[in-house]
Image: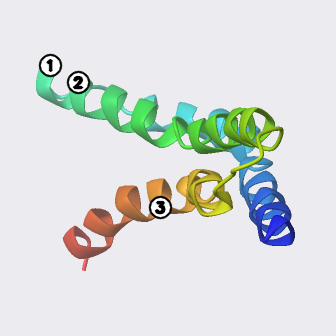
């Protein structure tokens, strides 16, 4: 089961390697002038929500380091935490795909 944790860790690292590019490209969200304070809050919160996706990798690695030393360890929880960035991005982009159709 430890192999599954390493696979999940590798997948999370792959998606989180794109985070610096996402940070750089997020400046284009602020390229156009704000129409109102609601638009400003929506853009800032959208960018912050989008850029928060690597939290799962950080929490998953901390959980893996802490739990791998214990005798009774549940790797499924570690795998779920490590795959959280994928779920985070899916939840972020799902409403957009519905709205922009």
Per the image, the residue denoted by label 3 is 87
User: Label 3, label 1: how many angstroms apart (C-alpha)?
Assistant: 29 Å
Picture coordinates of residue 39, whole percent (x, y):
19, 31
First in residue order: circle 2 vs circle 3: 2
Per the image, the residue denoted by label 2 is 41
First in residue order: circle 3 vs circle 1: 1
> Image point 82% across, 68% down: which residue?
7
Q: Are marks 3 and 1 in contact (CB under 8 Å)?
A: no
Q: Are marks 2 and 1 in contact (CB under 8 Å)?
A: yes
> Image point 61% across, 60% down: which residue?
83
SS for dot 3 = helix
The N terminus lies in quadrant = bottom right
> Image point 83% across, 38% down: which residue?
69
Q: Nearer the viewer, residue 90 or 36?
A: 90
User: Label 2, label 3: how many angstroms apart (C-alpha)?
Assistant: 24 Å
Per the image, the residue denoted by label 1 is 37
């Amino acid at each position: 089961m430890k192999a599954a944790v390493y696979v999940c860790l590798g997948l999370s690292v792959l998606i989180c390697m794109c985070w610096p590019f996402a940070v750089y490209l997020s400046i284009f969200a602020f390229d156009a002038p704000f129409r109102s304070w609601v638009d400003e809050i929506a853009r800032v919160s959208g960018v912050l929500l989008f850029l928060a996706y690597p939290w799962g990798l950080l929490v998953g690695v901390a959980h893996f380091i802490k739990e791998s030393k214990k005798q009774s360890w549940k790797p499924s929880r570690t795998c779920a935490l490590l795959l959280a960035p994928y779920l985070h991005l899916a939840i972020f982009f799902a409403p957009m795909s519905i709205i922009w159709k």
